[in-house]
Image (cartoon, rainbow, N blue to C red):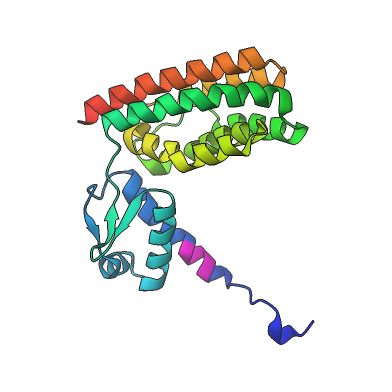
Amino acid sequence: MDQTQAPRLQPAARLMLRESVYESLKRLLMDNALEPGSRLSIDGLARELEVSQTPVREALFRCEAEGLVVRRPNAGYLVAPLITRDALLDLYDLRLLLEPTAAARAATNATDRDRRDIKDAVRAMGPAVHGDSYQAYREFAEEDAKLHTTIATAAGNPLIAETLDRLRAHVHSYRLYFRHGIAEVTTTEHQAISDRIQAHDPPGAEQAMRAHLENSRTRLLAAYDETF
């Protein structure tokens, strides 16, 4: 192969810078350090982070894909508003229609790799995470999202996984209640779901997922009412 036509590798330092800028911006958004609805200045963020505008633009693009920022004509990027109480209830109504069924199907259809990934995600959450910032919860949040995504995928119905991905449920959740000490009880509920899937128990997996989502809704509504 002609080496002149080979794809060029990105220097490690440049990749690390991009990731660092993205995580810094995401932390500000998840910690609600930036007011929902406020305008984001690319130039201002670049100055604050002491970087060029290019990694800031790339970070904003990634955050837009995650639903953390929105882009408006003639206004640029804005901090995405927090989900409303009614929209939160609608979100959980839909999750309760989809995810218990997905868990039941995963108990039957999950591959050995899926089951390992589910166990690994629960194990990675570890003991309760202490702290009052998104940074303290980052790994927990990532494994939580991974667990629900893996279960939805293992169900064998791509539409379920695609629909849940578009809901961006975990983004909405963690912008509201990561400060409220939910890690320990959530991990216990996740373990119950995993145990039923490992045991090839569809009714048990469905029941465990439903209980988890109903409890999560209760916790999130309490956090919402406390916030507003």
Rendered-image quadrant of the N terminus: bottom right
> Is there any visible trace of residue 21 in the rendered image?
no
Residue depicted at 38% across the width and 22% down the height: 217
Residue depicted at 23% across the width and 66% down the height: 74
**125 relative position to 157: left or right:** left
What's the magenta bit mostly, secondary-structure-wise? helix
Q: Which residues are magenta?
A: 14-18
Give the vertical position of 66 relative to 58 (above or below).
above
Give the vertical position of 216 relative to 159 (above or below).
above
| Whole-percent x, y for residue 120 in the image | 65, 33
Quarter-of-image position of residue 200: top right
| Whole-percent x, y for residue 143 in the image | 54, 37
Quarter-of-image position of residue 109: top right
Rendered-image quadrant of the C terminus: top left
| Whole-percent x, y for residue 88 in the image | 34, 30
> Is there any visible trace of residue 69 in the rendered image?
yes
**105 relative position to 208: left or right:** right
| Whole-percent x, y for residue 26 in the image | 38, 51
